[in-house]
């Protein structure tokens, strides 16, 4: 069997069966790409392992299953999954999220190869199911033009990622496997859940982050830890990023961007977010650009035939 070009890392924790097998279906229907599947479970106990094996065997897939007995947290679960990855690149995905169409992996690998990229992201369709497919007018990041700029604007990328927190969602990401694993090991002393903090690290290390112009994922809005409407889920992410920036302060002690980010997160922790815009006119200008983007955003350019082919699970 050929060495896979890309490993698809399916991250599970008490997954819903239908969501899990719908996600797996979006992977096994990929065309013109040598891929492998790695299912990394974070201590669920029962995550339908035997049914997963039967499903993937039925499609002749190359796969590995990494099953933790105890919960490790998202970052460590990914690191352990990456330890089994043979692909040069990796696409993380969670149950309920689907690859956008049947050429997503092929196009992602081609994009990464053409740019010798360590990290990239694509467009997302934020959806939920309420008796039918419902799509939300959301994007992440809100302003992605700088990631398509030549020459690459390193300082603007740092400011946008580190100071302005225009986050890139890990659900939309494709990474070089080795670079992703090294970045996760770097942030793991401070971060348990927010694996996409690696994008801030890449920016600080002057590693270019590239934006694909195509959709790469159907993202189930409200199911991930960052979009759940609970105080606990928001608290986890905020705590992760607060700890992350102070960890970065140790690694990049001379960086004015990190110093300012730590000060801004102190304001957030104290519940004084309004003061950020008052004392940072550039942050206010950025926020106005984001608000304008939100008001003019109309997500209508997606095609849902592949989604409907996958939705429904096994």
Image (cartoon, rainbow, N blue to C red):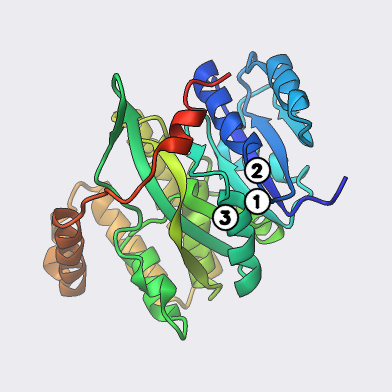
Question: Pointer 3: what residue?
Answer: 174
- What kind of element bears circle 1? strand
Which of the 4 image quadrants contains residue 66? top right
Few, some or many C-alpha atoms within 10 Å of disc 1 (few <14, some 14-19, many ≥20)? Answer: many
Extreme residue toward the front, this view: 305
Which one is in front, 60 or 13? 60
C-alpha gap between disc 1 and disc 3: 6 Å
Q: Identify the residue at horizontal 65%, vertical 43% (top origin).
A: 8
Few, some or many C-alpha atoms within 10 Å of disc 3 (few <14, some 14-19, many ≥20)? Answer: many
Question: Pointer 1: what residue?
Answer: 90
Q: Identify the residue at horizontal 51%, vertical 44% (top origin).
A: 101
Q: Earlier in the sequence, mark 1 or mark 3?
A: 1
Residue 150 to residue 2: above or below: below
- What kind of element bears circle 2? strand
Where residue 249 appears, as percent x and y from the top left, is 47, 65
Question: Pointer 2: what residue?
Answer: 8
Q: Are marks 2 and 1 in contact (CB under 8 Å)?
A: yes
């Amino acid at each position: 069997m050929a060495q896979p070009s890309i490993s698809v890392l399916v991250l599970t924790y008490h997954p819903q069966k239908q969501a899990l097998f719908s996600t797996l279906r979006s992977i096994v229907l990929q065309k013109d790409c040598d891929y492998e599947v790695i299912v990394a479970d974070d201590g669920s106990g029962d995550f339908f392992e035997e049914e997963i094996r039967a499903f993937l065997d039925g499609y002749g897939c190359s796969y590995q299953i990494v099953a933790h007995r105890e919960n490790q947290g998202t970052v460590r679960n990914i690191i352990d999954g990456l330890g089994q990855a043979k692909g040069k690149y990796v696409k993380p995905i969670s149950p309920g999220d689907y690859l956008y169409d049947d050429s997503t992996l092929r196009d992602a690998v081609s994009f990464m190869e053409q740019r010798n990229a360590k990290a990239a992201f694509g467009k997302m369709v934020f959806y939920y199911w309420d008796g039918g497919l419902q799509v939300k007018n959301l994007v992440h990041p809100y302003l992605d033009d700088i990631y398509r700029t030549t020459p690459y604007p390193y300082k603007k990328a740092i400011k946008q990622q580190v100071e302005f927190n225009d986050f890139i969602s890990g659900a939309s990401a494709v990474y070089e496997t080795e670079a992703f694993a090294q970045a996760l090991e770097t942030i793991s002393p401070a971060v348990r859940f927010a694996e996409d903090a690696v994008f801030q690290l890449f920016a600080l290390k002057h590693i270019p982050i590239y934006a694909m112009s195509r959709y790469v994922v159907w993202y189930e809005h409200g199911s991930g830890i960052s979009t759940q409407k609970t105080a606990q889920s928001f608290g986890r992410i905020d705590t992760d990023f607060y700890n992350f920036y102070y960890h970065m302060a140790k690694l990049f002690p001379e960086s004015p961007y990190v110093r300012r980010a730590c000060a801004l997160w102190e304001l957030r922790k104290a519940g004084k977010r309004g003061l950020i815009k008052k004392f940072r006119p550039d942050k206010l200008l950025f926020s106005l650009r984001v608000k304008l983007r939100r008001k003019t955003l109309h997500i209508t350019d997606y095609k849902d035939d592949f989604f409907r082919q996958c939705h429904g699970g096994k």
